[in-house]
Image: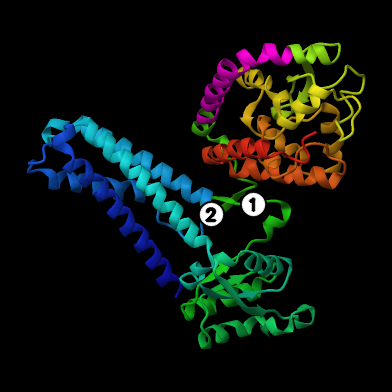
Amino acid sequence: MVNRYSTFIKAINLTTDYFILNVSMVVPYYLGNSIHFIDVNNQKYIQIVLIFNLTWLLSANIIGLYENILAEDSISTFRNVLKTHLLFIALLCGINIMVGANAYFITRGYVFYSAILFGFLLWSWKLIFLSIRKSKRSTLFNSRNVIIIGYGNTGIDLHNFFNQNKDRGYKLLGFFDDNPERITDKEKYLGHTMDCINYVLNNKTDEIFFTLPVTETIKIQQLLIDADKNLIRLRFVPPYYEYGMKQLTVQSFGHIPVISVRPEPLENVLNRFFKRAFDIGFSLFVLIFIFSWFFPIIALLIKASSKGPVLFKQLRSGRDNRTFICYKFRSMKVNDESDEKQASQTDHRVTKIGAFMRRTSIDELPQFFNVLIGNMSVVGPRPHMVKHTNQYAQLIDRYMVRHFLKPGITGWAQVQGHRGETRTTEAMLQRIEADVWYLENWSFLLDLKIIFLTVWNISKGEKNAY
């Protein structure tokens, strides 16, 4: 059943995308006479249609746009749409250069405006599709009956995931386990482990999740044999996530599978290039068009509020735990505790203009110099004082993982509400978890989302901004 619905949704997406593509070609075509895109009487137009459609099919297959269309999150979906659209345009440009526009009596303007119109309609449709997929109505087309073999920590976590993500369409029928006493919800207990094959054969079951520990080798081997004999597919859930290993990357060294501890998209040279190029362009824009005229005004206000320098410089922990000088507008009176004590809500050290700057994050503007130099990025984990790095590295196991990245002016933790003073180790742990999640899930679209949410949060005000 699940494969049938998945195929149906895939067909809907594919059909709609091609409809949009051809509409995007027809509109410029029939407007051709008035704005000189294309000769309307062109007898080779059918060949142009064929080239565009085949190019989109090739681009979608290379990127895998229609694979796992129900399982991917919004960020992954948008990333794949963007990659496919860019590859589609690149291939069209390549074909245009190799074949020559005159061969089909089309102009670069036609290709350009068709691609722009197609992009607008395509992204609008994907937003509508994601909204429908997120709604409760999506479960009508994406409902799967599943069972879990094994009631350990992995099975319980998987059960909780199904309950917390109703839009995924998983309906848990129950558990199979050889120790029924430990199952708290007796209604969900379906029998012993080896009874699961008969249950699946006699009941409507779409997927089986196998969560037994690797120590149960004999049972695992027997269940695999029985499942193969009865054409039943099993999904294995490895327990490695308990060690903080998420979105595992598996490589094969011959017949030996090797699992990477965590994915790091920014280990890819091309990804690092795009992020650095964006950092340079964005920081130059801010420094030239905002900082250049804003600096004299804020400098006068800072000087008028208290004695001391306009800029505050402090050693912070950067990438690979290398220290660097971080720049900020001075928001406090000059004091001896600035390298040890965080700002609190009623901190007497903060000046009046400093309180305003901290609420609006204006005090962070000089850090765009750090971005331009290369010490920081626009988006990344916030840099901490060296003292706090040394302190929390002893208290939180994965604290140092955040230093695989350049620190940022804003970050995923900040837009999730984990900014400002960290009064407890638990508060810092939540921030670190968000930073590590960003490390493992980076994408250019995610960076744009974080920048947008940062501006949005500043405009509406944040309770922890002090």
SS label for mark 1:
loop
Name the disc covering residue 246, or none.
Answer: 1
Q: Nearer the viewer, residue 210 or 163?
A: 163
Comes first in the chain, label 1 or label 2 = 2
Percent coordinates x, y for residue 398 in the rendering: 76, 43
Tell me the number on the disc at residue 73.
Answer: 2
Residue 285 in magenta stretch? yes
Residue at 23 percent across and 31 percent down: it is: 109
The alpha-carbon separation of the residues under discs 1 and 2 comes to 15 Å
Q: Nearer the viewer, residue 440 or 417?
A: 417
Question: Which corner quadrant of the image does residue 220 belong to?
Answer: bottom right
The amino acid at mark 2 is Asp
Q: Is residue 307 visible?
A: yes
Q: Are marks 1 and 2 in contact (CB under 8 Å)?
A: no
Magenta span covers which residues? Answer: 274-299
Q: Position of residue 376 (x, y in %)?
A: 66, 25
